[in-house]
């Protein structure tokens, strides 16, 4: 089997690429962000409320940026997750078969909507409307960005949640109906609990997307590095800070390292959510082949 | 009894309302963009580069730039993704190493796009000295597409019946011969649809290319891998936020967005339709 060894080696080697990229991402984020610790104490970075990276001396307090990320994520999840689960249950339990064949791919395609387009809608349509109808100083704010972010993650969460609902064996539904339960009772007491691990995974992956999403918050969140006090305050999440400031930052400066540090926080945050989701899904896996 | 049935009816109505709201919002946005942008589309819009500091002319340079970026990204991610999936599905034993590899691919899928941008900047642009270029931006997008392609290819390989492999082995074929002549050809159409869907994702991404190779403006097309490129999503961002006269170029902005949507959603639609056809054939 001489001819069999070479392809095997090549394929094994190539398969390492993904892992290599992952390690390189971690390594380069660490390499470019850790020099910041020479310029500022870790506690000042994580708990400082002043983000003035270009002042002299610079201030690298990232609390407002983290607060921006968290507030947009929480608000968009609150708006999007109930709606997504409604859509998922609808598609898997209540939708006529023929319509489902149309809705499901339509939803999947809508999940590909480029985020820059939603950001644009936020800037040019939603912001002026909010400003006028609610008499705000600016329409570019937490609410605007969260609403659009919510729209963005609905197709993603709904698709994954629907997969896990659809994977519940029909025997369970039939048994419930045979006992005289209505569809709603069957859904809430049998199907939904059975699919719960997959549904939780869907919600977590949606939240992960919201934390890491850049263009919507860059264009629609207003960009003020302050801790928000109302849903109509402008915010500046980690992602949009990086995207907006990296272009004008000299390589190797404190500001440059600070933006990589923001990237590292973002990476660790989303990674934790991702691994947690994977764990829930793996623990609860029951019906997957 | 009556109360339960009523509750069931109400719940069903609520579910319909959820679906309706979602489709109304997303469909409304699409319709709005089509109506606003349709007036700007013309033959010249596709074939002319932007003129007069981007207040007139078309979008040929960003359109071609996006196609170039997709090509570079796919030239990297497609072969690497397929081979990774072949390894995972055909060669790998379920040991600790394979687990780690799967974990890495899954983790890669969750990395925020702007972090890919930072990685591309520090690794491709600065460390490998590719500079801000088509190559750097394309490879960064390729890293982002890789886990998507691995996932789709692995699913495709899994759906090839074990009988095919057994039959091939029974004829005396080696494992590599079996993979190359039996498994890959059977899985290829499904792998390709996964590739098409990842093209849709790559073409619409903005954050990874902002500091790895996307240009504010270039006078012509990128001549080689080391020149900067314009790209449709970045062009939208620039026109909307940094133009010299933002209100005056609204027409161009809506036109550019419509073209971006046509490219991204068109490619995605093609991928989804083709996949549906494949599934129909395989269940027959």
Image (cartoon, rainbow, N blue to C red):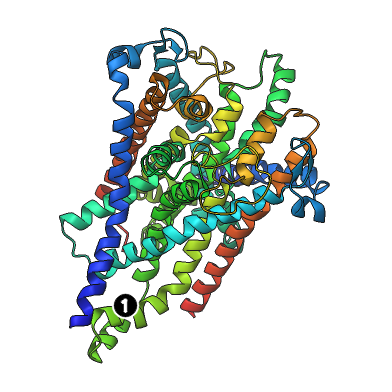
Q: Determine the secondary structure under disc 1.
A: helix
Quadrant in the rendering for residue A206: top left
Task: Locate residue A266 relative to residue B276 in the image: left or right.
Answer: left
Task: Please provide percent x and percent y for residue A130.
Answer: 69, 22
Instruction: Say above or below: A225 vs B86.
Output: above
Q: Is residue A105 above or below residue B137?
A: below
Q: Residue at x 60, y 56 (%)?
A: B67
- The residue under the point 58% across, 44% down is A114
The front one of B7 and A114 is A114
Can residue A193 be seen at all in this image of the molecule? Answer: no
Q: Residue drawn 29% across and 82% down?
A: B177
Image location (x, y in percent) of residue B149: 42, 59
Report x, y in % for residue B19. Answer: 60, 46
Chain of residue at mark 1? B
Say which residue label 1 marks.
B179
Residue A223 against residue B23 in the figure, above or below: above
Q: Does the rendering let one see residue B146?
A: yes
């Amino acid at each position: 089997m001489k001819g069999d060894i070479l392809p095997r080696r090549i394929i094994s080697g190539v398969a390492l690429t993904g892992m290599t990229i992952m390690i390189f991402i971690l390594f380069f984020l660490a390499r470019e962000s850790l020099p910041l610790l020479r310029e500022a104490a870790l506690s000042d970075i994580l708990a400082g409320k002043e983000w003035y990276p270009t002042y002299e001396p610079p201030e690298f307090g990232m609390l407002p940026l983290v607060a921006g990320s968290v507030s947009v994520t929480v608000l968009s999840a609150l708006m999007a997750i109930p709606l997504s689960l409604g859509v998922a249950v609808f598609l898997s339990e209540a939708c006529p078969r023929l319509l489902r064949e149309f809705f499901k791919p339509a939803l999947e395609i809508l999940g590909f909507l480029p985020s820059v387009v939603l950001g644009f809608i936020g800037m040019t349509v939603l912001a002026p409307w909010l400003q006028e109808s609610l008499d705000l100083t600016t329409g570019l704010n937490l609410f605007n960005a969260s609403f659009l972010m919510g729209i963005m993650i609905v197709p993603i969460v709904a698709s994954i949640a629907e997969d896990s609902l659809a994977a519940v064996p029909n025997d369970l539904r039939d048994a419930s109906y045979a006992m005289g339960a209505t569809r709603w009772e069957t859904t809430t007491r049998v199907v939904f609990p059975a699919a719960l691990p997959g549904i939780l995974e869907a919600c977590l992956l949606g939240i992960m997307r919201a934390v890491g999403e850049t263009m919507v918050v860059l264009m629609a969140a207003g960009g003020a590095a302050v801790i928000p006090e109302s849903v109509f305050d402008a915010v500046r999440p980690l992602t949009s800070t990086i995207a907006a400031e990296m272009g004008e930052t000299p390589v190797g400066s404190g500001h440059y390292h600070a933006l990589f540090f923001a990237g590292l926080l973002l990476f660790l945050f989303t990674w934790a959510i991702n691994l947690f989701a994977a764990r829930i899904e793996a623990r609860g896996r029951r019906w997957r082949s | 009894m009556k109360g339960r049935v009523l509750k069931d009816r109400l719940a069903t109505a609520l579910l319909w309302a959820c679906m309706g709201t979602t489709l109304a919002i997303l469909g409304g946005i699409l319709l709005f963009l089509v109506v606003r942008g349709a007036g700007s589309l013309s033959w010249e819009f596709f074939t002319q580069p932007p003129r007069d500091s981007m207040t007139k002319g078309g979008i040929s340079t960003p359109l071609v730039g996006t196609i170039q970026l997709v090509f570079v990204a796919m030239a990297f991610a497609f072969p690497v993704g397929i081979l990774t999936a072949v390894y995972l599905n055909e060669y790998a034993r379920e040991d600790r190493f394979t687990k780690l590899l799967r974990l890495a691919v899954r983790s890669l899928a969750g990395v925020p796009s702007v972090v890919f941008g930072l990685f591309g900047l520090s690794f491709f642009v600065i460390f490998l000295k590719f500079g801000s270029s088509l190559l750097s931006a394309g490879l960064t997008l390729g890293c982002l597409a890789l886990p998507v392609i691995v996932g789709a290819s692995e699913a495709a390989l899994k759906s090839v019946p074990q009988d095919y492999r057994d039959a091939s082995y029974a004829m005396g074929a080696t494992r590599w011969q079996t993979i190359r002549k039996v498994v890959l050809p059977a899985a290829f159409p499904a792998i390709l649809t996964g590739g098409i869907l990842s093209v849709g994702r790559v073409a619409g991404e903005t954050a990874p290319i902002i500091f790895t190779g996307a240009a504010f403006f270039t006078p012509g097309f990128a001549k080689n891998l080391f020149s900067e490129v314009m790209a449709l999503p970045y062009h939208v961002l620039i026109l909307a936020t940094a133009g010299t006269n933002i209100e005056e170029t609204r027409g161009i902005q809506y036109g550019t967005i419509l073209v971006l949507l046509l490219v991204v959603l068109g490619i995605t639609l093609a991928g989804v339709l083709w996949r549906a056809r494949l599934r129909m054939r395989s269940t027959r």
